[in-house]
Image (cartoon, rainbow, N blue to C red):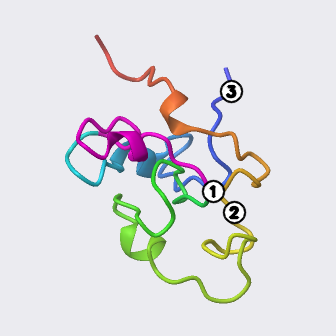
């Protein structure tokens, strides 16, 4: 079985997208893309430039890489201007359809 992850995923290990697991909704402790507060409509449907885990909008990262992810981009940028040129995370990225919410965690015992 092949594990699919974003080309820009901030992995810590073989195939785990650590930041996607750490990312939370801005209004609480729910996982990103699984927001249940009043911002759910907007936050559960992220489009355009996103953090490297693609679960949050660019500049609004909530994982342990937030300081790096949310810093102003300098030098060459992606067409959207919010990400480095070699790390585009919008729909125009080579794997722009990637959505970490569709991942299944087979590592959790039941």
Give the residue at mark 3: 2
User: Disc 1 or disc 3, which is closer to the eye?
Assistant: 1
Judged from the image, the secondary structure of the residue bearing numbered disc 1 is loop
Q: Which mark is residue 88?
A: 2
Q: Nearer the viewer, residue 48 or 54?
A: 48
User: Disc 2 or disc 1, which is closer to the eye?
Assistant: 2
Judged from the image, the secondary structure of the residue bearing numbered disc 2 is loop
39 falls in the magenta region:
yes
Lower sequence index among marks 2 and 1: 1
Q: Are marks 2 and 1 in contact (CB under 8 Å)?
A: yes
Q: Is the magenta stretch mostly helix, strand or loop?
A: loop
Disc tally is 3
Q: In which quarter of the image is the C terminus?
A: top left
Taking 30 as reference, is 10 left or right?
Answer: right
Q: Nearer the viewer, residue 69 or 56?
A: 56
Q: Name above or below for residue 42 compared with residue 64.
A: above
Q: Name above or below for residue 45 compared with residue 63.
A: above
Lower sequence index among marks 3 and 2: 3
Q: Name above or below for residue 46 compared with residue 101.
A: below
Give the residue at mark 1: 8
110 falls in the magenta region:
no
Picture coordinates of residue 65 (x, y %)? 40, 66
Taking 70 as reference, is 3 left or right?
Answer: right
At 46% from the left edge and 70% from the top edge, which residue is drawn?
Answer: 59
At 63% from the left edge and 56% from the top edge, which residue is drawn?
Answer: 8
At 64% from the left edge and 40% from the top edge, which residue is drawn?
Answer: 98
Magenta segment: 31-48
Lower sequence index among marks 1 and 3: 3
């Amino acid at each position: 079985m092949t594990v699919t992850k974003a080309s820009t995923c901030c992995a810590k290990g073989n195939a785990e997208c650590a930041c996607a697991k750490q990312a939370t909704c801005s209004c609480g402790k729910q996982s990103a893309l699984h927001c249940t507060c009043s911002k759910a409509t907007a936050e559960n449907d992220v489009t355009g430039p996103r953090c490297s885990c693609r679960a949050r909008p660019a500049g609004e990262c909530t994982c342990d890489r937030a300081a790096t992810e949310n810093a102003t981009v300098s030098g060459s940028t992606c067409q959207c201007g919010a990400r480095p040129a070699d790390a585009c995370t919008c729909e125009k990225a080579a794997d722009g359809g990637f959505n970490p919410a569709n991942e299944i965690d087979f590592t959790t015992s039941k």
